[in-house]
Image (cartoon, rainbow, N blue to C red):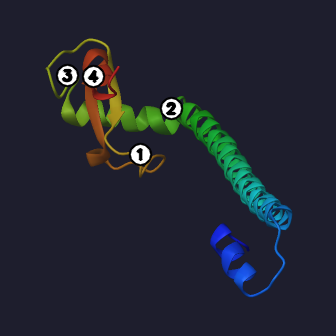
Amino acid sequence: MLTFTNLESNKSRNMAVTKKQYYQEMRAYYKKKNALKKKRAKKKKKELDEYKKRGKELRRKRKEENDEFKSKYQKYLKSKEWSDIRNDLFHVRGRACERCGSDKNLQIHHITYRNVFKEEPEDLEILCASCHMKEHGK
């Protein structure tokens, strides 16, 4: 690329460089530079679009899995198996909230969902509706 300082040194070497040639080269240089910027921006936009698309697909898949789990979990809570576990827990621990002692609106809370569908008694807690809501931050 030619510069004004190069113009002077080129003149001194008997090279015929005109301002017109200099500006033509400068335009070509900036045109190429802008083309590279656009190319990089287009590449970044494409990467961002792919990232968003992957994220959207992952969220959709996670939602489907979550909906499937919720459906299966709701069926489980209505099953005879869950009813037996619930009644056994009330029989062993009594019919009172383990936090406040209330005997109204009792529910079974899963301390952890790691063992859902194959719970151990230590994975469960008897709570009244109020304490259960507080536990879930509602």
| Inter-mark Cα distance, 3 to 2 | 20 Å
Say which element carries label 3: loop
Q: Which residue is mark 3?
A: 96
How much space separates mark 3 and mark 1, taking CA atoms?
22 Å
Q: Secondary structure at mark 4?
A: helix
* Residue beneath disc 2: 77
Q: Earlier in the sequence, mark 2 or mark 4?
A: 2
Crowd class of label 4 (few under 14; some 14 to 19; many from 20; radius 10 Å) = few
The structure residue drawn at horizontal position 26% and vertical position 29%, both measured from the top left corner, is: 126
Residue 114 position, x and y percent, is 41, 51
Sooner in the amino-acid sequence: mark 4 or mark 3:
3
How much space separates mark 1 and mark 4, taking CA atoms?
17 Å
Horizontal side, residue 95 vs residue 65: left or right? left
Q: Quadrant of the C terminus?
A: top left
Q: Are marks 2 and 4 in contact (CB under 8 Å)?
A: no
x 73%, y 73%: residue: 2
Amino acid under label 3? Answer: Ala
Q: Identify the residue position indicated by label 4 in the image.
A: 134
Question: What kind of residue is marked 4?
Answer: Lys
Question: Where does residue 59 sit, x and y in percent of width and height?
Answer: 64, 43
Of callouts 3 and 2, the N-terminal one: 2
Give the residue at x 14% y 20%: 101
Q: What kind of element bears circle 1?
A: loop
Which residue does the numbered mark 1 point to in the structure image? Answer: 113
Residue 32 is situated, as x and y percent measured from the top left of the image, at 80, 64
Foreground residue, 25 or 125?
25
Q: Tag 2's secondary structure?
A: helix
Nearest-to-viewer mark from 3 and 1:
1
